[in-house]
Amino acid sequence: MSISAQSIIRRCVETLQDTTSVRWPISELVRYLNDAQREVILHRPDALVRNQTITCAVGSRQALPPDGAKLIEVVRNARTMGTRRAVRMVNREILDAQTPNWHALPGSDDVLHFIYDPRDARVFYVYPPATAATQLDIVYAAHPTDIAEPADGALFTAVTGNIGVPVIYGNVLQDYILARCYMKDSEYAGNAQRAQAHYTLFLNALGAEGRGTLSVAPNPTGNPNQPQRAVG
């Protein structure tokens, strides 16, 4: 199920009472919509998750696909005729201490471990180093695809395409757009407060959705490869 970008923009122009798009051009609202989608991923990288089989680069250093924002998990080896062996995270400091030259080891078609540093979110390393035949099933947070901006002077009916995040974020996107719109007109009485109120709704909704997701997840204490998180 998907929701059209046009429906989001329509709700916004109706709320703003600017259905002819004089004060807030539609192209501007679409830019705010694209910003909103990116900010959702900033706060909730799990809002747009991809499960994909990748062919590794030769060596230990690997990169996410072009639309990748952050690595979430390396699941298993994925060669059709391979072992499909699970891949586990390992602490790089331990590996560096025990086998300092591990980056230069002979390549293997199957990977045993992966190493990840969240400070370099689009890169991970594999042990042993990969060959040209190595394939992995990975899970990553993706960047949403931007909605095309209509021509100047267009009405909301000119907006095409679907939002890039799941439909449950439709109201969240609307609050972000309204916050940006009222911020633009913050010199008018009450608009600064309206902008703050909508941005607070945006943040609160993202937090509530996160708590709800964890509360019903099959493993609510979090990924066993990551520090456990409390629900609440």
Image (tube, rainbow, N blue to C red):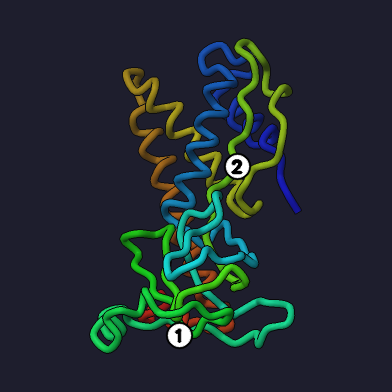
Q: How many neighbours does mark 1 have within 10 angstroms: few (below 14), some (14-19), or many (20 or more)? A: few
Kindly identify the residue that appears in the image at 53 percent across and 49 percent down: 143
- Report the residue at 58% width, 68% height from top: 132
Residue 213 drawn above or below residue 170: below
Q: Please give left or right for residue 133 compared with residue 181 in the image.
A: right
Q: Depth check: 193 or 206 in front?
A: 206
Mark 2 to mark 1: distance in Å? 31 Å
Element on which disc 2 rests: loop
Circle 2 crowding by C-alpha within 10 Å: few under 14, some 14–19, many from 20? some
Q: Which residue is mark 2?
A: 145
As rendered, which of 3 and 212 lies closer to the eye?
3
170 or 57: nearer the viewer: 57
Using the image, tell me which numbered label, if any, was put on residue 224. Answer: 1
- Above or below residue 52? Residue 189 is above
Q: How many circles with numbers are drawn on the protein?
A: 2
Task: Give amino acid for label 1.
Answer: Pro
* Residue 109 spot, x, y in % from top left: 58, 79
- Residue 222 appears anywhere in the view: no
Q: What residue is shown at x 42% (from left), y 81% (from top)?
A: 89
Residue at the image point whose x is 34% and y is 21% from the top: 189
